[in-house]
Amino acid sequence: MIRGAEFGQVIRFFVTACGGLILDLAVASALIIVWSLSDPVAALIGLGFGMVFNYFTHLFWTFRGQNQRPSLGHFIRFAVGVGVVLVVRIAVLWWLETQGLQAYLHPTVRLGIAAGLSFALSYLICSRLIFRNRTSGSEGLF
């Protein structure tokens, strides 16, 4: 359940995720349509573009005031979180393919379904593990 104070953060996360998703899907769709790459490979490359956009936007806007600074270590932790989300997204794309839905759904629709299902998981990972408030002496798992 989202607490009242967290609502603004969720909205910022959603706006940031939408921006990253638009970039992600545009790149992935172009790779599928123009260069005939497979859905999973195109999704991986598109996700990479979206990941860099999202990291800096989350750091400086979505989770502002969380005592975080950009660093290679923090970006790597974010990338690991994105990796978990990628596994979910690829699993959904694989399932859609096994159901024969590639013949009926446009690539952007397939990628959008997979990305949409991974949104909630992504918010939980980012807000609870990656960008949580760090006060002095409270280092944790991430």
Image: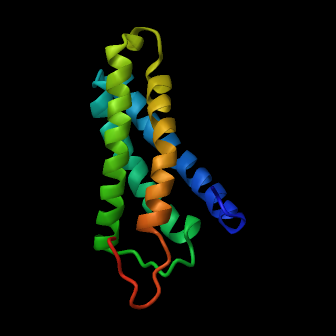
Which residue extends farthest front?
A: 1
Most extreme residue toward the right is 4
Measured as percent of width and height from the top left, residue 48 is found at 34, 48
- The percent coordinates of residue 43 (x first, y second) are 35, 35
Quadrant that contains the N terminus: bottom right
- Give the residue drawn at x 38%, y 20%: 96
Nearer-the-camera pick, 10 or 40:
10
Is residue 78 at least partly visible in the picture? yes
Please report the residue visible at 40 percent of the width from the left and 8 percent of the height from the top: 103
Taking the spot 45% from the left edge, 24% from the top edge, the residue there is 110
- Residue 45 in view: no
Q: Please say if 8 is above or below 45.
A: below
Q: Quadrant of residue 7?
A: bottom right
Q: How many marks?
A: 0
In the rendered image of this protein, does residue 99 appear above or below residue 41?
above
Image point 38% across, 36% down: which residue?
A: 89
